[in-house]
Every structure is written in structure tokens, then in C-alpha cells.
């Protein structure tokens, strides 16, 4: 296929976990691909703001895409994370019943899961629950050994970096304004960064996928933003649980209930809540929900103390089910029936993370059926992440410092992140300079002091690397400067 | 390879430096200070205001000047120190793992002095709802950016919390041309020193709003406004008191937390109220040979007291090194009305002992009473007490003699 300046065979709108997975999957073929992402970095929408759970697939109605793709994704997730050097741990999940009538729900979930071909599901009694989770209050539970955790932002970044390496072009800070179907059947995509043309458009715009779809066809989809707030607990509290702890889901709520997620980095997340909101970008947290989260925590894990809380945040689900209805609609993964070569991905909410790769495969199949793409023999499935010094054994640590003394300088004291790792995060392949991008890549500033110790040091390293003025240091995207300049206009120290 | 040391001091700030100098003066030779920064002096380096040293040196010094007094002594006495070196592991056996550009080093000491200081409480820890824009700093980080790096953090500032660093920063930012709109304090009284309220707020016409807190934060990118509200007697928001204030910066001065991650690893028992280790009359933790002083033990309001505390514990350290600690039965300590905490938490041997207290709330004409059952041991009168000001009282060995239990209360 052809590539001129701004022409690509495939343009993917949206650099979330799904968009990046599609980009990588497509890069296995000889085809030119561009990802257009409106933010400074990949994954800033839904993808970095969820529980990071690789669901097993028993929560979803049998026969739906959600059930099918989740189960498929769960099975191949370890391999994906291995290829991309992304953390993955199969820690298992327990859904805890606290009332007798909930046990019936557990049994239903088990039956549904077995129908979906989820392995290893077991109903366990209170004694076994006590053995697995001594601190959790419950009378019985459904145990799912196949449920795993990953780092949702590192996975998204890894998919993007691997796609980039395999020839995909990433255009960050590039917001699609409109799309025109041209006479030669190509698309012209107008953005704030100029024009792109392509043979295919993949609408992977998450919360804005309805808006992007409506750029080429009449109103067909609608996405309702549904916010979930979380608390993050100090690593010191990590001993409280061993598995993912979920309540029995309540029908019609459109969420899985406030749960307790041990993260890859040994924090615990409490949440998310489930609240339809008006604006798709309102990532605020609220005092009502914070109170509710604390109350839920007390119900299941009375040992959790408010002293353990180090942060709160929220994410937003891209729901098709309207507020009046609640619950879930199935994923839409299809070529538009009115606009040729325009592929829509609508309503990719949970289990979108677990399903990202199977979704990508579906999308590639749709294109492949029409184009007979030839394989890219240069495709390299492997990507190396930033080596975590803190996770190495003593001998490796010594060797690393010898090899590069920057490993001997701890910049982030809470997470014990070294200067070397921060420099690698700053020098990331996508070229993102925002502080939050360095945080996602290195873990610096994620600990209990929330950057109190390392923020200044990281600002200095960033400035040094990119020769930035103080006011050019941003937290997250445009208009998020951290500093207003130098202390006094008379004093200029460069 | 394990290097042996007599005394290892973790942290080269106010507490660590004073402890090092005092140890050396007591004849302890083999000392090592381990400091993670590129310089000694710790947080004093960014405290460029004056008011340090009134008690210790009888003059009003800036933070760096105060630190220099000790740094000079450390250098003069040739006390060894490591810079740019972070202790990443501390064991109950008093083994210390240090990381720096030279590699990983292991030490074992007869005595470890914990002098790691404290860190600031953050927005996340106090759960302020709202958006997460840039422009929200803890006061100490803002102080570091301005005073050590010469940056300006913002132009229109609201400060939440009236801790001393917040008050100092209100003045500092005003002097740098920023507008400090208000300081909101959740409690009915300030948690900062009265002299700072006068010199940093009132002298600059900056209003201090007691019983007020921030209930919402807005900003897309950079902070654009905060909403503050008045709190009622039971802590609820008084309806109609909400006020949205346009600003680009929110500074938080909402408390300090002793930095005891290493202590935890070493199995040291912490006090829930102070956040520091539980110590005995010598400043020794439950792990024999591990001592604590300064802000890692309890958050101080005056650096002079940090130095005094550090010097004080070296008496016990000398006793320990010379095998003179013979533990007798523990004197049971109980805390009575009006007091938030007492340090030390335990007493094993009878010696002249300095007790530190913080009161629960401000008051006038109060007396601190030490008693055994109903028997008065000692009392000390205070014309004014304030939670912001630590009370320190010394009991002599003769006063403590033959006591089995000790109750302290404020009446």
C-alpha cells in the first residue's frame, strides 16, 4: 500500500490501550499506520484510570463479545506481558458474600463463568475464605484463580512503544476536528496538527467514540460517562489482603461494586464508585464518594485505616447503557454499514483491558478480509521496559551501579526509583515530557510522600535534558505549568 | 563486606549533626553520618528566614547559618560523613545498607541514631476532593523550589493549614510579589507558633481564617480556584459559608509525619500519636542500641529543641556503649487529661530525664502535674499553653527515685 506525507493505510483515532493494541497488531503486517491521540501521551483517558485487573470472564453474559474476548484475553495475557516486559501477576480473586442470599448470586456467577469457559472457579466456605483472606469479613466466596493484575498504564505505554518500533507513527497532542470521506474513497482527517488521509479509519476514541462516529455517519451511538472514584493505600497496608476482593455485584448498577485491588506495586486500590456524570472530562473526586468508599472498606476490611490513604483519583467509563437503564451493553466492534472502511469500537468499558488484544485481532481480521495484508517479516514482538532497580537482587544491583553509577542515586525515596530509571523515563521513545508521564513510566512520585522529596529533582533533570524554561514544565498537558518562572524577574539563572 | 562502626547516624540534618558533635565530645570516636542529600544540614538549608538559635546560641540565625554552626564543628572534629548516600535498609541487628554512586555498602554499628526527620502530609492523605490540576504544593516543597532553586510557584495563593512552614511561606511569597489571599485553618486555633502568625500573617495583612477548610478544587491544567467553607462545632460545613476563591496555587501546611519507614523495617515499635518510635528515658527504642532524636522521634517546633534532644540522648548512648545500662523494672507512664502525648513513653532507669509534651488545645494558667497515685511528684506552671508549642520539663533522678508509676496531666 502507499504512503505519502500524511497518508496512511490506517489511521487509528485514540491512543488508549485498545488503540495501541490495534496499532501493534496491525504492525505485524505490511501496512502504514498512524495513531492520533489528542493528549500529550497515550493512555491518559480510560486506560490509566482503572483497577488494572485482567478479568477472568465470569461476570459477563454468555455469548456476548465481552465474555468471549475477555476469556480469550485472559488466557493470552501472560504472554503479551512477557513480550512487552510489563508486570503481570495471577493473584486470583474472591467475590465475597456477606449475606445468605448472596450465595445464590455466587452460584449463578460460577455457572455463567463455566459456560464462558473460565477455569478453576470454586465456591468456598467461610473457613476457606478465612484461610485465603484472614482479614476479610464474609460468609462464603467465589474464588477465581485465573484473575490477574497488571499495570494498565505500563501496558498501554508498552503497546505503543512496541508499535512505534515496528513502524507505527504516533501523533500526540493531535485532536481530530472532522473527517471527510473523499471521492477516491479515502478519508481526510482534519486535526489541530494538520490534515491526514487514510484508506481506513479506526475509531478507538473511547469516551469520545460517539462523537468521532458522528463525524461520518448520522447519530447512531451515544456514550455516557460514568465515573469511578478510587482511594490508593500506602504499601504498608499491603499485608491486609492477598487476592482481589470484590463484593457480590448488584444487578443494574453498571459496575462491579467497590472492590479492593492489590496493585502490581503493592498498593491497594479501594473503588471504584459508579456514578453517571455530565462531562466526559470531569475527573474530580467528591467528598460524598470518598465517605462511601471508606464505609465500604469498613464493611469488608475493618483493618483498613484512613491513615493508610495516600491519594484519591477517578476514572471514567465509556458506557453505552443510559443512566435510566444502567448495567452493560455489549462491545461494538464493527465496520460501519454506511461508511466503508470506517471501523467503530464503541462502549469498550470493563473488561476492555483484558480484552484489548483480542479486540485488536478482531479489527485486524475485519481489514484482512478485505485487504489480504501481507505479514511484516520485520515485526519484533518484544519490547524492553525500564529496568526496576528496586526489584533486582543484591548482586545485580551492585553490577548495575558499577555499570552506570546513576543506578546508585535514589531520586524517589518512597518507591526507591533511581536516577537512571528517571532519565530513561524522561528519554521515553514517544518523547513525552509531562511530569505525569514520567511518573507512570518510573513510579517516581507515586509513593506516600507524593513527590515531596523527588519533584524538585525531577524538574531539574527534565530541564537539563530538554533545555526547558521553568514555565515549560507541565504536570499533565497544556496549561498545566508547575512553575510561573524564576523567583524574581531580575534574577535569571540558566 | 561488612564495615563495623561504633555509631552510625542516619540523617545529617539538625538532629544528626548535633548528635554527632555531642557523641564526639563524649569521647566516641568511630562515628559515621549518612546523608542522602549532596550537603549536610537537611531542611535547614531551605529555611532562609531567621529565628533559629535563640535558645542555643542566644542570637537569631537563619536556617543555613544555624546548620553551619554544626557543620563547622563536624568538619573541625573530622567526624566522617557520607553525602548523596541513602540508607535503604536497616535491620534489628543494626546492619545498615547504604546506596550511592560507588555502590552498595553494608555497615554494622553498635549504636544507630535515627535522625531522618519528617515529611509533609499531602493532599491525598487529608482527602481534599476536587480536580487534580497543577499548582498544588506542600509548603515545604514550595519553599525548596523558591529558596533553593530560585523558581516561582505561583502568583495568587491560598494556603490551607497554619503550620509554621505555611506561615513562613505566606510571608516569603508576599515578599516575592505574589498575592497570598488567605490562610485557612480547619481547627479553632492555629497549629503554628504565635510569633509566626504575627510576623508572617498579621504584619502583611494576610487574613487567617480559623475553622475553615478547602472543600473543592477546580482547574483544567493549572489550578483556577478553590472553594473554602466554614466548619461548625462538630466539623460539618456551615451551609452558605462556601466561598470560591480564584487562585493559581494552593499550598498545604497540614502537618508533618516522622519518616519512620526504616525504623519499621528494623522492628521498631512506633507511637500512634507522635508517629515516632516509642523510646525510653535515654531516647532508646525497643531495639537495644537504636536511639532516636529530632523530628523522626516527634515533630518539633523549634530547631534548638531538636539539637538539645540530640545532645541529650548521647548521654544514654555513652552509657549503652560502656555497658552501663542495667534495666530495672519499668516505671509505668500514663497520660492524663489535657495532653496529647508524652516522650519518653517508657522509663526503665532512674536518671535526670527530660519529658516532652504537647497539649490538646490552647489554654491559660495551666499546671503540668506529675504524680504517683495521689502523691505529687512535681508540678510546673505555664501562663499559656498551645498545641503548637512543645512543653519540655526535666525531672531529676531524685524526683524520680522510688517511683513505680508516673501519671502526667494538665490542670
Image: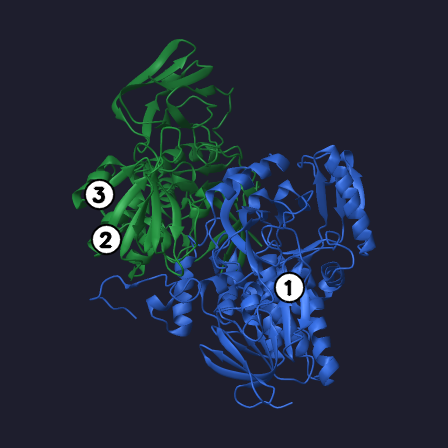
Are dots 2 and 3 on a single chain? yes
- In the picture of the structure, the residue carrying the numbered disc 1 is A86
Residue A487, can we see it?
A: yes
At x 56% / y 60%, what residue is drawn?
A: A48
**Residue A67, horizontal then vertical, whole percent:** 74, 58
Are dots 3 and 1 on a single chain? no
Give me the C-alpha separation between circle 3 and circle 1: 50 Å
Residue A67 versus residue A224: which sits nearer the camera?
A224
Q: Which of marks 2 and 3 is in front?
A: 2
- In the picture of the structure, the residue carrying the numbered disc 2 is B179
Chain coloured green: which letter?
B
- In the picture of the structure, the residue carrying the numbered disc 3 is B201
Question: Which chain letter goes with mark 2?
Answer: B
Chain coloured blue: which letter?
A
* Image position of A393 (left or right of A177): right
Q: How many labels does the image show?
A: 3
Amino acid at each position: 500500500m502507499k504512503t505519502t506525507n500524511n497518508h496512511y493505510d490506517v489511521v487509528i483515532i485514540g491512543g488508549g490501550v485498545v488503540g495501541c493494541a490495534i496499532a501493534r497488531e496491525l504492525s505485524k503486517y505490511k501496512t502504514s499506520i498512524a495513531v492520533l491521540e489528542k493528549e500529550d501521551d497515550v493512555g491518559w483517558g480510560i486506560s490509566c484510570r482503572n483497577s488494572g485487573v485482567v478479568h477472568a470472564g465470569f461476570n459477563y453474559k454468555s455469548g456476548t463479545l465481552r465474555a468471549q474476548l475477555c476469556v480469550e484475553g485472559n488466557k493470552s495475557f501472560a504472554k503479551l506481558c512477557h513480550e512487552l516486559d510489563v508486570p503481570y501477576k495471577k493473584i486470583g480473586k474472591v467475590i465475597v458474600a456477606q449475606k445468605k442470599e448472596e450465595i445464590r448470586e455466587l452460584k449463578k456467577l460460577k455457572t455463567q463463568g463455566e459456560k464462558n469457559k473460565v477455569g478453576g472457579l470454586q465456591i468456598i466456605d467461610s473457613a476457606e475464605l478465612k484461610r485465603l483472606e484472614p482479614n476479610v469479613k464474609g460468609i462464603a466466596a467465589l474464588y477465581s484463580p485465573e484473575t490477574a493484575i497488571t499495570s494498565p498504564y505500563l501496558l498501554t505505554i508498552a503497546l505503543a512503544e512496541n508499535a512505534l518500533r515496528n513502524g507505527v507513527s504516533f501523533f500526540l497532542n493531535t485532536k481530530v476536528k472532522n473527517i471527510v470521506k473523499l471521492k477516491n474513497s479515502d478519508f481526510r482527517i482534519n486535526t489541530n496538527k494538520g490534515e491526514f488521509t487514510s484508506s481506513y479509519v479506526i475509531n478507538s476514541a473511547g469516551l469520545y467514540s460517539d462523537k468521532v462516529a458522528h463525524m461520518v455517519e448520522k447519530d447512531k451511538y451515544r456514550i455516557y460517562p460514568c465515573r469511578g472514584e478510587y482511594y490508593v493505600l500506602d504499601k504498608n497496608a499491603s499485608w491486609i489482603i492477598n487476592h482481589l476482593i470484590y463484593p457480590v455485584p448488584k444487578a443494574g448498577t453498571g459496575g462491579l461494586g467497590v472492590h479492593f485491588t492489590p496493585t502490581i506495586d503493592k498498593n491497594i486500590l479501594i473503588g471504584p464508585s459508579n456514578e453517571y456524570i455530565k462531562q466526559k472530562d470531569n475527573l474530580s473526586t467528591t467528598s460524598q464518594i470518598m465517605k462511601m468508599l471508606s464505609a465500604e472498606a469498613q464493611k469488608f476490611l475493618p483493618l483498613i485505616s484512613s491513615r493508610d490513604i495516600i491519594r484519591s483519583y477517578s476514572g471514567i467509563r465509556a458506557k453505552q447503557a443510559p443512566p435510566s437503564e444502567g448495567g452493560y451493553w455489549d462491545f461494538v466492534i464493527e465496520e460501519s454499514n454506511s461508511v466503508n472502511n470506517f471501523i467503530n469500537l464503541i462502549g469498550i468499558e470493563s473488561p476492555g483491558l483484558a480484552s484489548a488484544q483480542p479486540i485488536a485481532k478482531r479489527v485486524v481480521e475485519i481489514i484482512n478480509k478485505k485487504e489480504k495484508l501481507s505479514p511484516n517479516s520485520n515485526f519484533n514482538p518484544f519490547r524492553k521496559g525500564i529496568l526496576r532497580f528496586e526489584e533486582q537482587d543484591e548482586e545485580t544491583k551492585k553490577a548495575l551501579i558499577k555499570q552506570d553509577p546513576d543506578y546508585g542515586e535514589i531520586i524517589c525515596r518512597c518507591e526507591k526509583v533511581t536516577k537512571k530509571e528517571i532519565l530513561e523515563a524522561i528519554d521515553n521513545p514517544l518523547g513525552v515530557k509531562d511530569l505525569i508521564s514520567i511518573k507512570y513510566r518510573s513510579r517516581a512520585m507515586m509513593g506516600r510522600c507524593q513527590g515531596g522529596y523527588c519533584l524538585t529533582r525531577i524538574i531539574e533533570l527534565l530541564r537539563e535534558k530538554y533545555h526547558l524554561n521553568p514555565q515549560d514544565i507541565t504536570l499533565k498537558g497544556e496549561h498545566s505549568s508547575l512553575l510561573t518562572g524564576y523567583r524574581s524577574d531580575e534574577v535569571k539563572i540558566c | 563486606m561488612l564495615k563495623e562502626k561504633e555509631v552510625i547516624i542516619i540523617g545529617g540534618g539538625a538532629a544528626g549533626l548535633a548528635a554527632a558533635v555531642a557523641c564526639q565530645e563524649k569521647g566516641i570516636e568511630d562515628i559515621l553520618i549518612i546523608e542522602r542529600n549532596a550537603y549536610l544540614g537537611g531542611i535547614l538549608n531551605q529555611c532562609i528566614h531567621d529565628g533559629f538559635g535563640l535558645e542555643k546560641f542566644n542570637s537569631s540565625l537563619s536556617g543555613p547559618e544555624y546548620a553551619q554552626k554544626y557543620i563547622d564543628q563536624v568538619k573541625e572534629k573530622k567526624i566522617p560523613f557520607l553525602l548523596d548516600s541513602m540508607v535503604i535498609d536497616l535491620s534489628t541487628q543494626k546492619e545498615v545498607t547504604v546506596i550511592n554512586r560507588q555502590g552498595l555498602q553494608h555497615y554494622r554499628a553498635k549504636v544507630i541514631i535515627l535522625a531522618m526527620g519528617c515529611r509533609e502530609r499531602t493532599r491525598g492523605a487529608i482527602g481534599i476532593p476536587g480536580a487534580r490540576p497543577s499548582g498544588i504544593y506542600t509548603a515545604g516543597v514550595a519553599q525548596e523550589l523558591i529558596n533553593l532553586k530560585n523558581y516561582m510557584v505561583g502568583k495568587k495563593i491560598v494556603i490551607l493549614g497554619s503550620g509554621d512552614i505555611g506561615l513562613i511561606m505566606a510571608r516569603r511569597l508576599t515578599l516575592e510579589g505574589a498575592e497570598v489571599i488567605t490562610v485557612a485553618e480547619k481547627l479553632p486555633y492555629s497549629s503554628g507558633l504565635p510569633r509566626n502568625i504575627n510576623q508572617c500573617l498579621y504584619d502583611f495583612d494576610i487574613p487567617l481564617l480559623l475553622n475553615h477548610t478547602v472543600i473543592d478544587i477546580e482547574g483544567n491544567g493549572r489550578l483556577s480556584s478553590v472553594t473554602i467553607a466554614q466548619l461548625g462545632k462538630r466539623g460539618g460545613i456551615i451551609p452558605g459559608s462556601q466561598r470560591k476563591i480564584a487562585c493559581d496555587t494552593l499550598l498545604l501546611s497540614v502537618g508533618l509525619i516522622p519518616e519512620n519507614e526504616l525504623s519499621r523495617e528494623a522492628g521498631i515499635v512506633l507511637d500512634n500519636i507522635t508517629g515516632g518510635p516509642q523510646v525510653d528515658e535515654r531516647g532508646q527504642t525497643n531495639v537495644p542500641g537504636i536511639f532516636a532524636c529530632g523530628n523522626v522521634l516527634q515533630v518539633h517546633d523549634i530547631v534548638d529543641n531538636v539539637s538539645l534532644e540530640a545532645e541529650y540522648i548521647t548521654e544514654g548512648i555513652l552509657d549503652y556503649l560502656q555497658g552501663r545500662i542495667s534495666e530495672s523494672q519499668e516505671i509505668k507512664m500514663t497520660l492524663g487529661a489535657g495532653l496529647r502525648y508524652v516522650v519518653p513513653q517508657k522509663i526503665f532507669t532512674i536518671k535526670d530525664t527530660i519529658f516532652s509534651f504537647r497539649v490538646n488545645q490552647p489554654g491559660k494558667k495551666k499546671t503540668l502535674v506529675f504524680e504517683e497515685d495521689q502523691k505529687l511528684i512535681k508540678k510546673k506552671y505555664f501562663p499559656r499553653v498551645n498545641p503548637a508549642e512543645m512543653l519540655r520539663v526535666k525531672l531529676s533522678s531524685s524526683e524520680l527515685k522510688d517511683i513505680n508509676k508516673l501519671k502526667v496531666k494538665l490542670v
